[in-house]
Amino acid sequence: MASRVIVIGSGFAGLAAATKLAAAGLEVIVLEKNMELGGRARLMECDGFRFDMGPSWYWMPDVFENYFAEFGKKVSDYYELIRLDPSYRVILENQEVVDLPASKVALADLFESLEKGAARKLAAFLKQAEYKYNVGIGEFVWKPSISVAEFLDIRLFTKAISLDLFVSFSKHIRKFFKDPRILQIMEFPVLFLGATPQNTPALYSLMNYAEMELGTWYPMGGMHEIIKGMVSLAIEKGVKFQTNTAVTLIETHNGKAKAVHANSKVFNADVVVGAADYHHIEQNLLEESDRNYSKGYWESRTMAPSSLLYYLGVDQKVGNLLHHNLFFDEDF
């Protein structure tokens, strides 16, 4: 049995993998190229300001609850959560401002004020979305996706049809609503998936369920508090961390991990977990004979859109802005 595991990357995936492996009795070392832990969810401090560098939306609280519960812990053991109300603010093209309330009753009233009959349709939409959330997360997401054979189950195929896997989100949402303001509000969550509503299966109305039913939350002290909690748990389970350590090569022998090269050092390993970006791990750290895909394959892919992030420190409260503000000034 493998005894020493090297995990590359200390983001959510790397921390979760490292902690579970350490809890199973393995020696685990996490190598992180940055000085700070957290991957894209790391913290930047500059001139007295603190910036969460990546995630700013806390959805699907059950996922975090289930994670910590696996180790006999609770979210509240590590950070304090509050539900935001309103969940966020939308600024439309004509500068019309719409605040999305956390209350289901208030949300229904808002939709009805934008489009007659929309409250009833919202209830029907969210009922479908709840089913998709429970089945999509419970029976699809948790599969390891190692082989297509995992999905060759008539029950899953039947559910795939009821989950609207073969209908676009854009078409699906227009079966319920007509008002362009509602359409924009309902379509925006799928942008987190890195695709447009026209190219996203209607299954992902589960994102709306996560947002509207399960709520938008905030960990007091910032999103990095989640990382601090996960790191604390990892250390408790025996995980060791080494920051400022950029991996340059994953060495293999007979198809099995042998060592990891980083900062002119060699870390011996029985297993290597690549928790950095797939493309980076495969194209930059593995020898060509160990790769699943060629350079040409990656170059032919349509990648998800990226974004430009500005970290702006302001020493006073800015009027007319909430914690989350979405400016819908361009067509999706």
Image (cartoon, grey):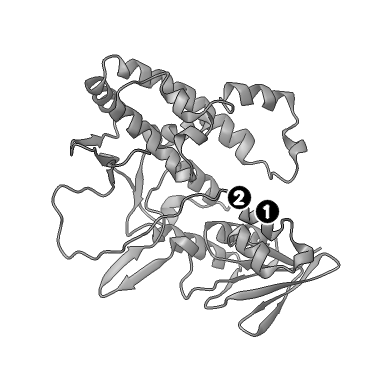
- Which residue has dot 2 on it? 301
**Residue 231 in the image: x percent, y percent?**
51, 64
Direction right: furthest residue: 254
User: CB of mark 2 within 8 Å of CB of mark 1?
Assistant: yes
Image quarter of residue 211: top left
Quadrant assignment for the C terminus: top left
Q: In the structure shown, which secondary structural element does the residue marked by tag 2 occupy?
A: loop
Q: In the structure shown, which secondary structural element does the residue marked by tag 1 occupy?
A: helix
Quadrant assignment for the N terminus: bottom right
Residue, x 18% and y 39% (percent of image)?
95
Q: In this view, does 89 lie above or below 247?
A: above
Q: Is residue 303 visible?
A: yes
Residue, x 48% and y 42% (percent of image)?
195
**Residue 65 in the image: x percent, y percent?**
49, 46
Q: Which of 97 and 299 is in front in this view?
A: 299
Amino acid type at circle 2 is Arg
- Crowding around mark 1 (Cα neighbors within 10 Å: few <14, some 14 to 19, many 20+) is few
Image quarter of residue 216: top left
Q: Which of 264 and 209 is in front in this view?
A: 264
Q: Can residue 85 be seen in this view?
A: no
Residue, x 37% and y 31% (percent of image)?
186
Q: In this view, does 134 lie above or below 2?
A: above
Residue, x 62% and y 56% (percent of image)?
299
